[in-house]
Image: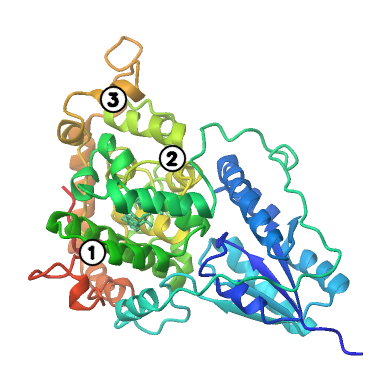
Amino acid sequence: MAEPATALVWFKRDLRLRDHAPLVEAARFERALALVLIEPAWLDSPECHPRHVAYLLACLAPLREALAARGLPLLVRVGEAVPVLEALRRMHGLSHLLSHEETGPGWSYTRDKAVAAWCRTQGVAWLEWPQTGVVRRLRSRSGWAAQWARRMQAPPLPRSAGWAGVPDLLPEPLPTLGDLGLSGPGPTLPPAGEAAAWAGLGSFLQGRAAGYRRALSSPLSAETGCSRLSEHLAFGTVSMRCVFQATERARQATPDAALARDLTSFGARLRWHCHFMQKLEDEPAVEWRNFSRAHDGLRPGDAGCEAPWRQELFEAWCEGRTGYPMVDACMRQLRATGWLNFRMRAMLVSFAAYHLWLHWRAPGLFLARQFLDFEPGIHWSQMQMQSGTTGINTLRIYSPAKQAAEHDPEGRYRRRWLPEWGTPAYPAPVVEEATVLAHAKTVLYGLRQQAPARAEAQAIQARHGSRRSGLPPSGRRRGRAPVPSPSQMTFW
Ligand SMILES: Cc1cc2nc3c(=O)[nH]c(=O)nc-3n(C[C@H](O)[C@H](O)[C@H](O)COP(=O)(O)OP(=O)(O)OC[C@H]3O[C@@H](n4cnc5c(N)ncnc54)[C@H](O)[C@@H]3O)c2cc1C
């Protein structure tokens, strides 16, 4: 007798039930299983911090319960993908592997290639669906924004009522951090899981979004004035499409023109999320090397640079003791909470790149471990953009003193995160600003004037640069040009 068709839903960064294509597909099979993998390649990667693992486990607890209530036991395995999949195939006779596409770091790309090869050898059909606006094998950036808009406007998938699980198979217990050889994540984690994502979205759209544009820049107001959805989007506890559509409904329903503009601004950032991820999808090497090869070897830490790496400066930056109070306060907040608003993230990177003249890779790995919402495509693109190595973006050098004056004029933020500020225990500045910035500007502006850098910039713009928003006129600011993409904006 032929084996029944058995589908395995492989959960990756999509830890939810709603708007989940692999789960919808699995309901059509005679038997279904669900798997989450905790891979040593991830645990050992230089981007992974115990806070990420703790947050994953916190997302899995409600997911496991919700799946079990609908007949689908969640299997939890610690191991590399191919051996785990092979063991499951032998035990349950898998015919199909169902998952979302992932735009991850190099190790996940290598793993996906190994899984694809295993599927071919074993005759397992691997079906993958996009879950953001990222387009696989994109031929041209022209038209990308329209594709993004089409995906975001398509109806979300209904939640499946139930699945035909494998008889006698029970959901498996979740490991603890200790089981995985890790110690506590340090900071208190924000609420995790699908219900928490929807609660966060609701509280933003129904209240906190008012004044969003004003609240974005100061680390004091951003803490509650931003959506705080980034970790939910990174772990996939809510789909980008559901967030986008809820935002659009709120925007269309409100009679308040200022709130409508706040929501338009927020919606544009959802597109930026995918815009930046698309860069890594199209050119995975930007995780390691400069978008603009004309910028290779510029700073210590980059291959080809002969100047020595300044470990003492790097450590002062990582530990929040550079002697620049706004920089140090931001680093302390980030280390303590796993989150920081956009402008202050950009300032931290700008400081590492221009004041300390460090190549972006080591600071980027350090920040990846700190950001609970680490999303490789956004992260590495932003690291390079804020370090001036994309070749196409305006150079933005943030002055910590100016940021402090504008966004923490009374010093409340600095006093909160840097209690030793203003006491003899606080260190003197590790570099003299005027001197180091004069050097940085001379080198970078000089380089950008050279013919090879200019020619290369055109090619980078054609491959990665943003185009039009792709939204119909109702989704744009009325009577004004569409919200510009980050590559056209200056945040001074
Ligand atoms: C050096 C650097 C590294 C960054 N690394 C990450 C990262 O690993 N993961 C991450 O999600 N964001 C990253 N960002 C972008 C941004 O800082 C965060 O998305 C934002 O602070 C998250 O808070 P929020 O959800 O409250 O944001 P909101 O202001 O409420 O924005 C809503 C959503 O839009 C997206 N978004 C907002 N700003 C940007 C942006 N500039 N680029 C791309 N998407 C954006 C995010 O998905 C965010 O959750 C980085 C920024 C910089 C400068």
Q: Nearer the viewer, residue 440 or 373?
A: 373
Residue position marked by numbered label 1 in the rendering:
253
Residue 255: image quadrant is: bottom left
Residue position marked by numbered label 2 in the rendering:
309
Check disc 3 and give the amino acid type: Arg
Earlier-in-chain disc, 2 versus 3: 2
Report if the beta carbon of the residue with label 2 is closer than 8 angstroms to ligand 1. no
Q: Position of residue 162 (x, y in %)?
A: 67, 70
Alpha carbon distance from label 3 to label 1: 39 Å
327 shown above or below 157: above
Q: Position of residue 273 (x, y in %)?
A: 37, 62
Q: Residues within 10 Å of mark 1 (few under 14, many from 20)?
A: few
Check disc 1 and give the amino acid type: Ala
Earlier-in-chain disc, 1 versus 2: 1
Q: Position of residue 355 (x, y in %)?
A: 28, 38
Report if the beta carbon of the residue with label 1 is closer than 8 angstroms to ligand 1. no
Q: Nearer the viewer, residue 472 or 284?
A: 472
Residue 378: image quadrant is: bottom left
407 shown above or below 86: above
Residue position marked by numbered label 3 in the rendering:
414
Q: Residues within 10 Å of mark 3 (few under 14, many from 20)?
A: many
